[in-house]
Amino acid sequence: MLRSLSVKYSPLLTRIRSRGRAFSTQPASSLGCLPTTDSPVVSKLAFFNSVTGDGSKIPSYRVLDGFGIPIEGAEVPEISEQFARRLYENMQLLPTLDNILYNVQRQGKISFYMTSHGEEAAVIGSAAALADDDEVLAQYREVGVLLWRGFTLDRVMAQCFGNHEDCGKGRQMPVHFGSKQHHFHPISSPLATQIPQAAGVGYALKRDPERRSKNVACVFFGEGAASEGDFHAGMLLASTLPSPTLFLARNNGFAISTPSSQQFYGDSLSARGPGYGVDTVRVDGNDVLAVMSAVKEGRRRCLEGGRAVLVEIMTYRVGHHSTSDDSFAYRGRQEVENRKKIDNPITRFRLFMESQGWWNETEEEELKSRLKQDVLASFKRAETLKKPDLAELFSDVYAEEPWNIREQREELAGLLEKYGQVWEPWRTELKIFKDEGKKLLG
């Protein structure tokens, strides 16, 4: 049993206290100070398992309820009708694009696709809060950020088809976008690799006198990626070497087939931020105004303090993980249908716009018709374009071509010269390339 002890006079204790006064600002009656923390010292043994102090769950920030009505006490962002229309049109563009390209993949015209169904507010709200020249390191569902920044539908289609207009020259699988012009770093398939990279980009921005107070590195990832070691490496780097790195975690409920409830036991991802000394907020990801406000404030904190911020965006992945997935094998169809109707981010913002007199049914029909026509026109154009030059197989790898690449290029050129027009399979295949192999032959 523990009991209180009365301390008798001791010459040794007197000397220790005397020395302590010389090195500490603590009063002589202090119980002492610890070498690696300035936390208060207590005499009662108590464990804790909550970052809120009272054991309650971390709250989720919201502006609009499910009917598009501002909740009591909410600070509604001051946005113009024109800006609201831009938000809404971009949100509506995503499902239009997703529906068409998903079906295009099913027809075998592209090899792969991933949708943003249910996450439109999370993506567009974040994009609207960033500066167009902030560096973005995305995962798979952030094409909306590119579209917000002016990336054209033709560019989207070019990447998915891998034709000669693709700025990646057909080297990436579909939805792995990248654009130097739009400060959008190329997407990588391996999970979570972009997170520590973003911490490095943020640190580079901090060291750049022209950008340190102007731009942040913004990294998108899902809650599944946060279960990778790279998440912790990135958070640790961005916090111990403070940098303006904005971590945006899309918690959409599933890491492919693994539900969030099986991915972590604590209070989701937001509970991890304070452990790294990182300012953290959780936001309703189906409320575009709440997302925009949270990300905007997170960005401000990044720039003001030159430090990292974590925003956990709570949403729901309505679509399948990808065209390689059937999500109804691990969740109920009715669950998905209910989410579409009850907590639809597009419907929520549309109701808000209608309440402001900024939108009506006629405009809704006209917008959907126009977006569908635009996407279909871009798709039809893309499928007629040829693949990049065959010579591009060997470009953009080294600043100066090494001997082994030169040998490979010369070997392929020799085979084309010998068999390209006499062997039927090659003669047919060459026609899909922009130059039909002529540039490679010189």
Image (cartoon, rainbow, N blue to C red):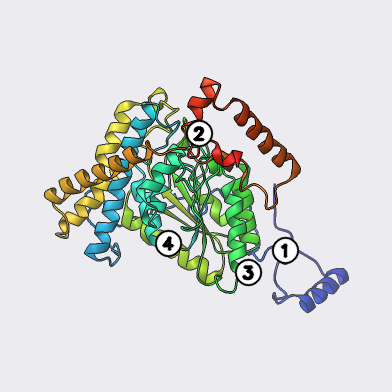
- Residue at image x 32%, y 57%? 289
Q: Which residue is mark 2?
A: 262
For badge 1, the amino acid type reads Leu
Marks 1 and 3 in Cβ contact (< 8 Å): no
Q: Secondary structure at mark 4?
A: loop
- Residue at image x 58%, y 65%? 205
In the rendering, at what x and y percent does residue 129 appear?
Answer: 39, 61
Mark 4: few/some/many CA within 10 Å (<14, 14-19, 20+): many
For badge 2, the amino acid type reads Gln
In the rendering, at what x and y percent does residue 425 appear?
Answer: 52, 21
* Residue 97 located left or right of residue 425: left
Q: CA distance from mark 3 to mark 2?
A: 40 Å
Label ID, residue 187: none
Q: Which residue is mark 1?
A: 34
216 versus 209 height, above or below: above
- Residue at image x 43%, y 64%? 131
Q: Which residue is mark 4?
A: 130
- Near-viewer residue (352 or 365): 365
In the rendering, at what x and y percent does residue 195 appear?
Answer: 57, 50
